[in-house]
Image (cartoon, grey):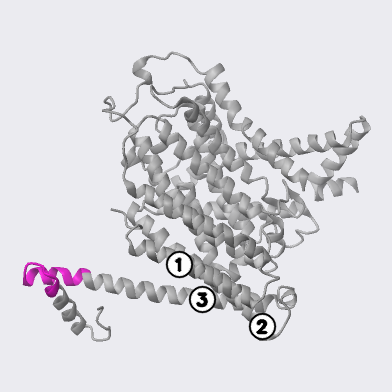
Amino acid sequence: MMSEWTFIGLFLLLAAVFPGAPIILNSVLLGPKKNNPVKNSVYECGIETVGDTWVQFKVQYYIFGLVFVVFDVETVFLFPFAVAYGQVGLFAVAEVILFILILVGGLVYAWRKGALEWV
Amino acid sequence: MDIAKLLNDPVNELAKLLTGLLAGMGLPSALITTILLIIGVVAIGTFCLLLPLFLIWFERRVVARMQDRVGPNRVGWQGSLQTIADALKLIIKEDITPIGADVIVYNISPILSVVAIITMWAVIPFAINIVGTTLNVGALYIVSVGSLGTLAIMMGGWASNNKYALLGAFRTVAQLVSYEVPMLLSLLVPVILARSMEMNKIVGEQSIWFVIAAPIATLIFFATSVAEVGRTPFDLLEAESEIVAGFHIEYTGMKFAMFFVAEFMHAFTVGSLTAVLFLGGWRGPWAEEIPLLGIVYFMLKSFAGYFLVILMRASLPRIRIDHMLDLCWKFLTPLALGAIVITLLFDKLGPALLNVEYARWVGPDYMFARAGLLLLGNLLLGLITLYILSSEARRQRRAAEGEPAADHAAHGGHDEHGHGDEGHGHAAPTHAPAH
């Protein structure tokens, strides 16, 4: 068990080397370094950016993010049940279906409230 | 004899050979294990970084053939070295960080997007005993690591200090994040069927491929995974004709290339995951005796999935964002929940009706009965879905047809709208009025 997670840990550390090495090779060693303000400026249809870039945005994106969090967390709760599925009886299955129905209730609520409409 | 063993199972035989060699040099066993782990990581990482060189060429050729063009055919045999030439070109390009960009986030983003894809391959089984590591939470690990890719795209778009990139990042939130929900839900179905999250156990349980027992979950998983990659028809986050290039508009050189490595590798990973979860992974004739054959079967199935992704890319137009979110939240998510309920119910009711133990029900005796029953359940769900869809479409069509008539009669009040509906109901008396 331990060596499996060691492998994952090593993997996460070393995996960064594979994309990192070519990028550093490119930016430090091989690429030319002739910066100037015009080259580094932000391109937007060939003219300079008007105003700040990090602007206020539509609340709709935020609502989708919230609905996602609710559903994602609830779905993760179903995974342990799925693993234990072989050992549980019909009663537990009925309970989980009830849980899914509550999830559907949430979906219907968001739907009726218009949270899923793109406006 | 040794050669035959080596050909049968190259990875494990080489590992044994190396262990013997290192032990002969007098190294402690903990160090040997670490060295073998590092070699494993390097092997999988190199595979993930080199495979896109082939995939990009392959995809360009296939798409060109579908669009009646030739595609790259100059560098090397049939243009097969074109991608290497492109990579060499990109590595000597200047690395530009735009003024006002969030430098740290901007530089981490391309690395993170590749790391997310490479680390997925840690748990994908290549053959019966060739797998990076056998995590007991494999399926969940795949999803959690995969969502790092979404985060990378959001980071890149936000940090670039460009409004197009920011729009790309916003669309990422709406699209990728939304499609993760039906993907996670459809992933639950093979986990229920295999009663394990371990990838190799999921493959091991597929005496009959899960695509038979769970066709709806297969379709949902494939479609949502393609959406997760951000490919046409779901390429809203980098839609060239709308927001120039989306999140990677400000990136140059190798950082730009890394986004492409991640994208192509992710598209291939979609094929592999579909193969592992639903198409039996490395399973095939003699795959259990000869692991090398398992790799061949696994790669063939992965490429079949990847080829389907390319065909979708070349033949379907981009869909609108509101349609896309409707598809996700109002169709795929309820359908995936339905598929889970159907699987849960039928897999328990079957043995209850036939009066057998669950352990025997999942065994080889009732293999066909189980797959057949679940297929029946899926067909039932499919028919119900088709019925609901067609009646809803009919209702909307009526409403759309009723509108102009109502406008013509008066100035478009709601009562007139109702009259228009009834008129059409009269013309087609088989359908009940929509109200």
Task: Indicate the amino acid at tag 1.
Answer: Val
Q: Which residue is mark 2?
A: B352
Do the dots labelled 2 and 3 sit on one chain? Answer: yes
Give whichever of A91, B277 is nearer the camera. Answer: A91
Q: Which residue is mark 1?
A: A104
Q: Which stretch did the figure color magenta? A: B400-416
Q: Quadrant of the C terminus of chain B?
A: bottom left
Residue B188 horizontal side relative to residue B312, left or right: right
Mark 1: which secondary structure?
helix
Mark 2: which secondary structure?
helix
Task: Indicate the amino acid at tag 3.
Answer: Leu
Image vertical order of residue B257 relative to residue B232, above or below: above
Task: Indicate the amino acid at tag 2.
Answer: Ala
For mark 2, name the chain: B
Q: CA distance from mark 3 to mark 1?
A: 21 Å
Residue at image coords 34%, 36%? B164
Asked which quadrant contains residue B39, the reply is top right
Residue B401: say if magenta. yes
Q: Nearer the viewer, mark 2 or mark 3?
A: 2
Mark 3: which secondary structure?
helix
Q: Position of residue B406 (x, y in %)?
A: 12, 71
Image vertical order of residue A35 relative to residue B301, above or below: above
For mark 3, name the chain: B
Q: Which residue is mark 3?
A: B379
Residue A52 horizontal side relative to residue B290, left or right: left
Q: How many neighbours does mark 2 have within 10 angstroms: few (below 14), some (14-19), or many (20 or more)? A: some
